[in-house]
Image: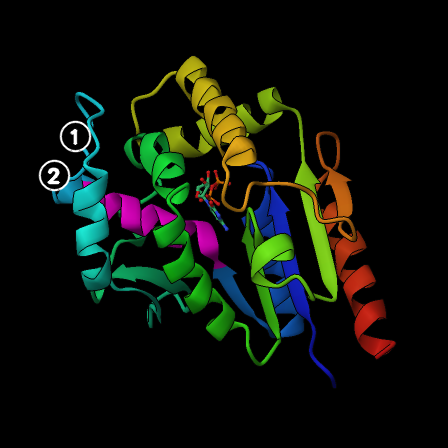
Amino acid sequence: MAKITIAIDGFSSTGKSTVARQLADALDYIYVDSGAMYRAVTFFAINHGIIDPGSGAFDREALLEQLPQIKVAFRKNENTGKAEVCLNDESVEDRIRTMEVSSFVSTVAAIPEVRQKLVEQQRLMGKNKGVVMDGRDIGTVVFPDAELKLFMTASPKIRATRRYKELLEKGEEITYEKVLENVEARDLADSTRKDSPLIKAEDAVEIDNSDMGEKEQFERILSHARNLISGR
Ligand code: CDP
């Protein structure tokens, strides 16, 4: 059967990755978490003293200089069967979703040279279709010809509550207010940056899941995807 490309964009913590993973499993497609790639580059910058999380100082030139040496890739973890993001061949999957990385990722993601490098890789991963990719610019920049584009939203408070629970479960010491602040700051930075801002593609289906259960949302999207695939 012909394969399609599914692009999922939207604000932070709207459940993009959950639905993307479910779709990829159901359709036997590849799932690519493009946000993990921006997070991996940010993690590199923090680890190499390019970003000082204490003062917030960021040496942009140093990052540009080291960019060619930063290798971001996905590798399947044979124990869990899930793809993990790797930085220079080492899995950093468990270390990129901290508040520290979240606090700087939108600054790093606004740099055109960083985007150019990662977008090139993302296009290669999707060149044979059969891919579900989530992020901020997937339907607008990475795959403007994707057959199915979704744009996910939910109220900031609901999103911050979801993210707060996730971080607590991982043992991070954090307050709800800090999480809400970060969610709102990233939404603003991502939507107003010059290069590839987060905007809804004209042909994207908008899904507000503030009051929608995970199962209902998934079933609706899957049936939409299957209709598109069988109509080809
Ligand atoms: O999980 P969450 O939705 O909070 O974020 P993410 O998907 O892990 O993405 C982290 C950050 O990477 C975003 O806030 C954006 O600044 C950036 N990003 C981007 O610029 N373009 C993408 N395609 C994906 C992520």
- Whether disc 2's CB lies below 8 Å from ligand 1 is answered no
Q: Furthest-bottom residue in view? A: 1
What residue do we see at 41% from left, 53% from top?
115
* The magenta segment: 33-45
CA separation in Å, label 1 and label 2: 6 Å
Q: Nearer the viewer, residue 203 or 129?
A: 203
The residue tagged 2 is 49
Quadrant showing the N terminus: bottom right
User: Which one is in front, 67 or 87?
Assistant: 67
Kind of residue at disc 1: Asp
Question: SS at mark 1?
Answer: loop
Is residue 12 visible from the viewing direction of this image?
no
Vertical placement of residue 25 versus 58, above or below = below
Q: Quadrant of residue 225?
A: bottom right
Residue 151 sits inside the magenta stretch: no
Amino acid type of disc 2? Gly
